[in-house]
Image (cartoon, grey):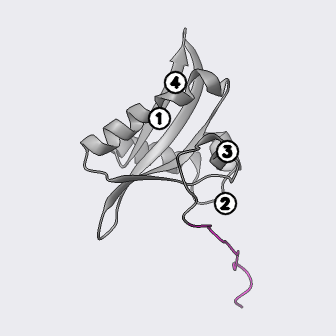
Amino acid sequence: MEEVVSHSQGEATSDHYYEELSSGSMQLWAAVEEEELLACMVTQIAPYPNKKVMRIIALGGVEMDKWIQFLPDIEHWASSVGCTALEAWGRKGWLKILKDWECSYHILTKEIKGRMH
């Protein structure tokens, strides 16, 4: 989880993820081959006023060709809990891999801490 936190904008710590995963507010997915952890993904159900989506908050691993094909299973699960779409928070490079996805938004950030006083 520390690698996820290090690639983020400081939204959460490992402890926050642990709390959310433990309470069921977030889901942890793992790809394992012969007792070796290849990848992990953290998701969260986002209940917008007009639709329910499964948000991929973090996804990473090694030997992607061995685990990327599990995404349709994730889509199926999301659909089974009432989601009508997926969204992912990630870097632009994912668009090269997730070819049937589109970039609907860009997330622009600006730190303001310490600037207001």
Q: Is residue 67 magenta?
A: no
- Callout 4: SS: strand
- Callout 1: SS: helix
**Amino acid on which disc 1 is placed:** Leu
Q: Is residue 88 left or right of residue 51?
A: right
- Dot 3 crowding, Cα within 10 Å, few <14, some 14–19, many 20+: few
Residue 108: x and y in percent read: 66, 71
Q: Earlier in the sequence, mark 2 or mark 3?
A: 2
- Dot 4 crowding, Cα within 10 Å, few <14, some 14–19, many 20+: some
Q: Residue at x 45, y 45 (%)?
A: 43
Q: Quadrant of residue 75?
A: top left
Q: Which residue is mark 1?
A: 71
Q: Label 4, label 2: how many angstroms apart (C-alpha)? A: 25 Å
**Amino acid on which disc 3 is placed:** Lys
Q: Residue at x 64, y 46 (%)?
A: 94
Q: Earlier in the sequence, mark 1 or mark 4?
A: 4
Eye-nearest disc, 4 or 2: 4
Q: Is residue 113 magenta?
A: yes
Q: Which residue is mark 4?
A: 31
Q: Which stretch is magenta?
A: 105-117
Q: Label 2, label 1: how many angstroms apart (C-alpha)? A: 25 Å
Q: Label 3, label 4: how many angstroms apart (C-alpha)? A: 21 Å
Q: Earlier in the sequence, mark 3 or mark 4?
A: 4
Query: Which disc, if any, is residue 9?
Result: 2
Q: Earlier in the sequence, mark 2 or mark 1?
A: 2
**Amino acid on which disc 2 is placed:** Gln
- Callout 3: SS: helix
Q: Which residue is mark 3?
A: 96
Q: Earlier in the sequence, mark 3 or mark 1?
A: 1
Q: Earlier in the sequence, mark 4 or mark 2?
A: 2
